Amino acid sequence: MDLKPNHNSPILSDPAPITKSRLGVHSNMLPYSAAPGVGFAPNLLLITRKRTGVLNDVRASIWLDAMKSSSPPPNRIAKDVVNELPSFDPDLLYCSWMVKYPSALASFDQIVTQAKGKRIALFLDYDGTLSPIVDNPDCAFMSDAMRVAVKEAAKHFPTAIISGRSRDKVYEFIGLNELSYAGSHGMDIMVSDKHSTNDQGKEVMFQPASEFLPLIDEVYESLIEIAKGIAGAKVENNKFCVSVHYRNVDDKDWNALANRVYDLLENYPRLRVSHGRKVLEVRPVISWDKGKAVTFLLESLGLSNCDDVLPIYVGDDRTDEDAFRVLKERNCGYGILVSSVPKESSAASYSLREPSEVMEFLKSLVTWRALEEGLNE
Ligand SMILES: O=P(O)(O)OC[C@H]1O[C@H](O[C@H]2O[C@H](CO)[C@@H](O)[C@H](O)[C@H]2O)[C@H](O)[C@@H](O)[C@@H]1O
């Protein structure tokens, strides 16, 4: 697919038909994670798309698998790490998984050794990283202690929040002016004037999906309609994308909800679905994601030189994998995956179990840098 890589034109030159003809399945039917590390049999993708009962079953099983795997149960086996264990002790499985993704706290010395003499650029996801996952998305508040930890970190390191939420909403939750914010999975970026490196020291705003706004508003209204009648389903407008939550939907209704969403999206070839934590994310088919947002922010902040800067990205979700991958491909900086269960594969280098460990990590970074700055005086 011909992507236009420059920041000004993230629009795919031909979003829908190429994928359709190549895969036999419409692009917006594919779970977002289907690109690298496909989680289902590739031959399923070669089936010619016809609205037969059998094919609907196949389609349903693809997204149902993706929906189930979006929040794996605690005893789910990380197959690439542990093959045949005599028992399914969750702690043992987690420890085995951590061989590949060591704790960022236990590996702290190793991380800061790489940061010596460099600026650290911090990128933080919100839900599940700074705030615990809760049933009601409107009540995902971060603790005051976490807010202080982020505020302190931002005194030493340029810090940006990168969230699937709308930028306004995530700002409302965090409330710190000294940060840069990228909402809507990086499609709504505001670089703080505190960080801005342009002549005027002004805020920089970048919205690569602005032309999709009317379409998103339209699909949001339709999603609200189709979610009616499915108990527990919740639709959230995130400005440049829409979340359809199924955390509070009975398992037996997941398929029905997904069918309604994907059926609706057949009328919107310029939109696609990605999978988050018990949420279907409807978003524009553009070549833009959290990884691209990280690259954009590093460049806007004058922090793209790997010799001077160590970027660290902390996130818990599949959508954060794009950012982990960018750091890995640049061979510059670290992705830290927040998860209390083994995940099948990740481009992160390290792990943390939960937001409380993220807070501990941020505090340790601040203490280390303050000490380093003191020593250098
Ligand atoms: O990129 P993020 O900041 O992690 O945002 C991703 C989505 O987070 C929110 O949903 C998730 O957290 C909710 C509150 O804990 C939880 O109820 C839900 O099941 C999770 O998927 C947010 O509501 C979504 O809009 C974001 O896209």
Image (tube, helix red, strand yellow):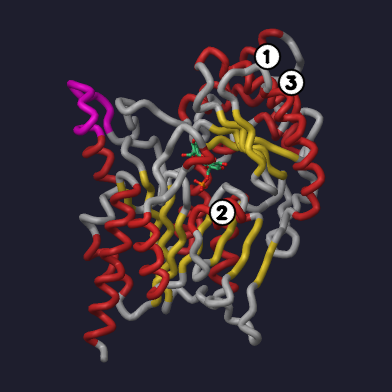
Indicate the secondary structure of the residue bearing disc 1: helix
Magenta stretch: give its range: 82-93
285 and 330: which is toward the camera: 285
Toward the bottom, the furthest residue is 377
Indicate the secondary structure of the residue bearing disc 2: helix
Determine if residue 21 is in view: no
Q: Mark 1 points at which residue?
A: 55
CB under 8 Å between discs 2 and 1 = no
Q: In the picture shown, does residue 54 fall above or below 278?
A: above
Q: Which of marks 2 and 1 is nearer the N terminus?
A: 1
The reply, left or right, for residue 197 in relation to residue 15 is: left
CB under 8 Å between discs 3 and 2 = no
Q: In which quarter of the image is residue 43?
A: top right
CB under 8 Å between discs 1 and 3 = yes
Q: Residue at x 62, y 18 (%)?
A: 230
Indicate the secondary structure of the residue bearing disc 3: loop
Q: What residue type is labelled 2?
A: Lys
Q: What residue type is labelled 3?
A: Arg
Q: Which residue is drawn at 61% across and 22% down?
A: 44
Magenta-span inclusion, residue 145: no
Q: In the picture shown, does residue 300 fall above or below 187?
A: below
Q: Identify the main secondary structure in magenta.
A: loop
Q: Which mark is residue 49?
A: 3
Q: Earlier in the sequence, mark 1 or mark 3?
A: 3
Q: Which mark is residue 290?
A: 2
